[in-house]
Image: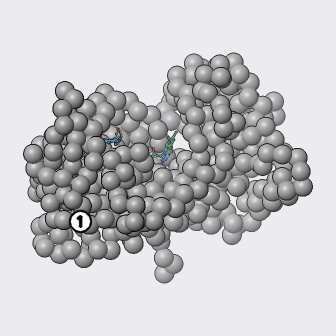
């Protein structure tokens, strides 16, 4: 089998890329390990940056989020020192988030792609990408009936996440890998309950971080910092609601709407970047290029930004014979990626205490309190926060 561009992975990055290439008349195919049902129900991100929404609107792919997404622009911090709110639409660049579940975005992107005649192979796992130092790279896959098969391409786009075949196939001496384990884990929860706050809630507590994020009018995402060796099943619903109440200080600020916990999973906060995002005719985008901890809700937004850049570069090359965009793709993405990584790292420091009672733990905890009080009191700090919190995409001052 052949295609000009073989795209690995039908997440936000792969499906946006597929849509843009398909419209540009490029022959492409998306190979996805999971089933259609799996990708359309996999709940992950929910907060789309203004820049992401602009990209999707620019390409006529925002009908679903314009109909069902809702604007969001407030976050609330609760700690030993009280609580305060920031309306970030009145700070920084004055931008808002759109709350729209990632699985709904994936469903929309897939529908647009298929309507335009796009090709997808579900339940098809990429095993290896070979000959990426030539102009005929090959992807070896396992087909739905378990047989091996090969796809030949001019370019391969690795949008298959951190554990995908694209990353695995990079020769060790061709890329540098940057990796940081933040030493923090979260229990990620979906509750069948309406949001309890009209804000993102950040509970900073001696027992650990707790987060509240709206998803829809009937579903709310919560996070609880947990020990590294936690198994999701260790936490029955009662224990979850009790701990959320404590860390979000409901005795002082009002109760949470409770409901069945429909999903629980442990997320280790880790970050990594592969540099450059290219080896020969293989390009990386989204989580395959850079994994970012969910502390600042950047991953899906970076995936969309990178997919648009990669689509433009591939179209320039394949339609006009101009490889300049492909040559600068990695450097342009890395600029955005490192800014997002830096902000995400700053958020981790803002939200988490250090374990232990020794002098160093006390020192770090005092730094964290000071970081929160600066955010509460300094307008300049708030503007900086708002610009980075809702933004993705490095914007140079005029
Ligand atoms: P993915 O969405 O992971 O898609 C990759 C696809 O490739 C998958 O469908 C997978 O099945 C497929 N695949 C994998 N291996 C293979 C293979 N070998 N062959 C073929 N197919 C393969 N980001 C935000 O911006 N905002 C948020 O609010 C946010 N919240 C998050 C909450 C949680 C709990 C988690 C875990 C993540 C969150 N993120 C958030 C991050 C965001 O979900 C990811 O960054 C985003 O999904 C990346 O998109 P992607 O297309 O690169 O990869």
227 or 201, nearer to the observer: 227
Residue picked out by circle 1: 133
Q: Nearer the viewer, residue 278 or 109?
A: 278
The residue lying at 52 percent from left, 26 percent from top is 263
Residue 193 at x, y percent in the picture: 57, 24
Nearest the eye: 330 or 177 = 177
Give the image quadrant in which the ligand numbered 1 is located.
top left
Residue 50 showing in the rendered view: no
Residue 184 x %, y %: 66, 45
Badge 1 density bin: few <14, some 14–19, many ≥20, Cα 10 Å: few
In the figure, is residue 377 to the left or right of 280?
A: right
**Depth check, front residue: 49 or 155:** 155
Q: Residue at x 42, y 48 (%)?
A: 162
User: In the picture provided, is 128 more to the left or to the right than 258?
Assistant: left
x and y percentages locating residue 300 in the rendered image: 43, 49
Residue furthest to the bottom in view is 398
Q: Is residue 383 visible?
A: yes
Quarter of the view holding residue 346: bottom right
Q: Specify the quadrant of the image occupied by residue 157.
A: bottom left
**Which image quadrant: the N terminus?**
top left
The x, y position of residue 5, in whole percent, is 18, 55
Residue displayed at 71% across by 30% down? 244
Lateral position of residue 169 relative to residue 6, left or right: right
Mark 1 falls on what kind of element? loop
């Amino acid at each position: 089998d052949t295609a000009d561009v073989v795209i690995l992975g039908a997440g936000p990055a792969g499906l946006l890329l597929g849509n843009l290439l398909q419209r540009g008349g490029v022959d492409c195919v998306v190979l996805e390990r999971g089933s259609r049902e799996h990708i359309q129900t996999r709940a992950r991100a929910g907060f789309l940056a203004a820049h992401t929404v602009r990209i999707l609107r620019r390409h006529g792919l925002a009908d679903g989020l314009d109909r069902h997404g809702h604007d969001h622009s407030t976050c609330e911090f609760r700690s030993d020192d009280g609580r305060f709110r920031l309306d970030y639409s009145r700070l920084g660049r004055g931008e808002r988030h759109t709350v729209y579940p990632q699985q709904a975005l994936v469903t929309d992107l897939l529908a647009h792609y298929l309507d335009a005649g796009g090709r997808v192979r579900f339940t098809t796992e990429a095993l290896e990408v070979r000959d990426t130092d030539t102009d005929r790279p090959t992807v070896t896959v396992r087909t739905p009936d378990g047989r091996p098969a090969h796809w030949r391409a001019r370019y391969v786009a690795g949008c298959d996440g951190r554990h995908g075949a694209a990353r695995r196939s990079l020769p060790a001496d061709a890329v540098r890998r940057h990796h940081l384990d933040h030493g923090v884990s979260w229990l990620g929860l979906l509750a069948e309950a309406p949001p309890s706050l009209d804000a993102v809630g950040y509970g900073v507590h001696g027992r650990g971080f707790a987060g509240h994020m709206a998803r829809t009018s009937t579903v709310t995402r919560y996070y609880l910092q947990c020990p590294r060796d936690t198994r999701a099943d260790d936490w029955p619903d009662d224990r979850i609601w009790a701990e959320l109440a404590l860390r979000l200080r409901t005795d002082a600020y009002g109760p949470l709407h409770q409901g069945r916990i429909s999903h629980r999973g442990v997320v280790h906060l880790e970050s990594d970047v592969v540099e450059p995002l290219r080896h020969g005719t293989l390009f990386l985008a989204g989580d395959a290029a850079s994994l970012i901890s969910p502390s600042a809700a950047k991953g899906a937004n970076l995936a969309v930004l990178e997919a648009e850049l990669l689509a433009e570069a591939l179209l320039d090359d394949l339609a006009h014979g101009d490889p300049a965009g492909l040559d600068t793709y990695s450097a342009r993405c890395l600029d955005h990626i490192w800014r997002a990584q830096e902000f995400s790292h700053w958020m981790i420091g803002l939200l988490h205490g250090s374990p232990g009672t020794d002098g160093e733990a006390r020192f770090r905890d005092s730094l964290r309190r000071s970081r929160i009080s600066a955010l509460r009191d300094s307008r300049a700090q708030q503007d900086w926060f708002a610009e980075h919190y809702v933004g993705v995409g490095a914007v140079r001052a005029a």
